[in-house]
Amino acid sequence: MIETQSPERFRDAADAALLEMRGLFAETPLQLNDHLSARFGARVWLKREDLSPVRSYKIRGAFNFIRKALDRNPDQALFVCASAGNHAQGFAYVCRHFGRKGVVFMPVTTPQQKIEKTRMFGGEFIEIRLTGDFFDICYASALEFAESEGALMAPPFDHDDIIEGQATVAAEIASQLPDGENPDLVVLPVGGGGLSAGMARYFEGRIPNDRFLLTEPAGAPSLRESLSEGKRLKLERIDNFVDGAAVAQIGARNFEILARFEASQVRLVPENAICVTMTDILNTEGIVLEPAGALSLAALDALGPEKLAGKSVVAVVSGGNFDFERLPDVKERAMRYSGKKKYFILRLAQRPGALKDFLAMLGPQDDIARFEYLKKSARNFGSILIGIETTAPENFQRLLGAFDEAGLNYQDITDNEIIANLII
């Protein structure tokens, strides 16, 4: 059990895994980001796991798991996993590398893009089976297949060999930092906990615990809640928007390692705030990130210059497998979170010139993004859904003042999740 190993022994094992890994792919870069460094008055280093062959760090754990399994049993011919995302792609890539057949179970609802990428990485060595509408059904099918066919199940995060493989991210960082530079803050995204557990274990004794900041999506705070209660909990429901990090329960082995941290060291980042970071980093740096890949950078935005100025910061960018069909939703969420877009339900008089009077209230930087009659509830008035975009949040203060002055009957539904999900 790796949590009982000495830090030195664990580091030696991770370093050995890294040497073996070099036969599969080159190290991912640790880049000093000028844009973020200037924004926060700090030295911000990005560990670019989005530049791995499968655009995420998951290839590391899958490689180490299968490598060590074959060391123990060279005749193991069949592997299986359940995943609709990065774990499936890393698993497929590694199966092809070792020339072993792998079966990937995915939910029927998996986007075609992810299916095709997994098939591309695995080639002739991968078979994809679509099973069930939800991941739990898919996972159960994979376990049943493993038992009936003698396949070895490659878990996504809760296994010693997976954790050891993900720790190679830390091993690379240790060799890539300039001589004498010890980070004041290491920011790690957390989903199932394989990456964060591996890196925390690798840096144990080298970087103090209080220099770590762990980040989770606000809609899936499994580590934060578990640390608060002092035991591993399973959340009753989660928000799946940050699909690469939204898990209902932190891994058991991972939690044993991460239990050394305080709940206050876990930063919960709203899903819409992550969208702001994704659009910002795309527009300024040309870097395409998936929601989970932007988690650590969104945490930096939340901390701000007042807490980061003068510090050396390492932030792990965990993945860049982003489906551009999601981009309109990401932009929408980002604008709403930043206060540049709002939705209203208006009660507008049904008389000639009423719409013209309303349009006259808009400022030169205000734009109507949506206009829809919902219901004419009376002969003289009608309910209208309207979406308004503007260039700065403060523009809405002037606009709402104009609404009030005109005696306009309106309701701001921007942050009303129930109504917004039904009609926006």
Image: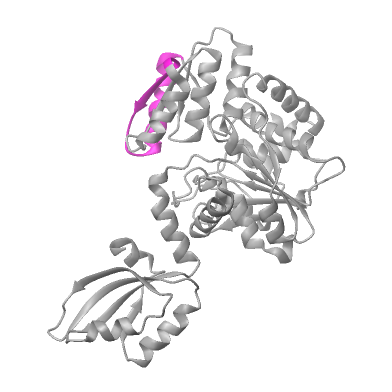
> 42 or 17, which lies in front?
42
Residue 388 visible within the image: yes
Q: So how many labels did they put on this image?
A: 0
Residue 143 visible within the image: no
Q: What residue do we see at 30% from left, 83% from top?
A: 358
> 99 or 74, which lies in front?
99
> 58 or 150, which lies in front?
58
Colour setup of the view:
one colour
Q: Which quadrant of the view contains residue 332?
A: bottom left
> Whole-percent x and y of residue 206?
82, 41
> 112 or 257, which lies in front?
112
Residue range in magenta is: 124-150
Magenta stretch: includes residue 135? yes
Look at the magenta stretch and give its main secondary structure: helix
Q: What residue do we see at 70% from left, 40% from top?
A: 30
Magenta stretch: includes residue 161? no
Outermost residue, top direction?
75
- Please state, as top left, top right, bottom left or bottom right, where the C terminus lies in the image: bottom left
Q: In this rendering, would 418 be left or right of 391? A: left
Q: Is residue 318 above or below residue 327?
A: above
> Whole-percent x and y of residue 404?
37, 89
- Please state, as top left, top right, bottom left or bottom right, where the N terminus lies in the image: top right
Q: What residue do we see at 80% from left, 31% from top?
A: 6
Outermost residue, front direction?
364
> Whole-percent x and y of residue 280?
55, 56
Outermost residue, right direction?
180
Q: In this rendering, would 223 be left or right of 126? A: right
Q: Which quadrant of the view contains residue 141?
A: top left
> Whole-percent x and y of residue 189?
61, 46
Q: Is residue 169 above or below residue 417?
A: above
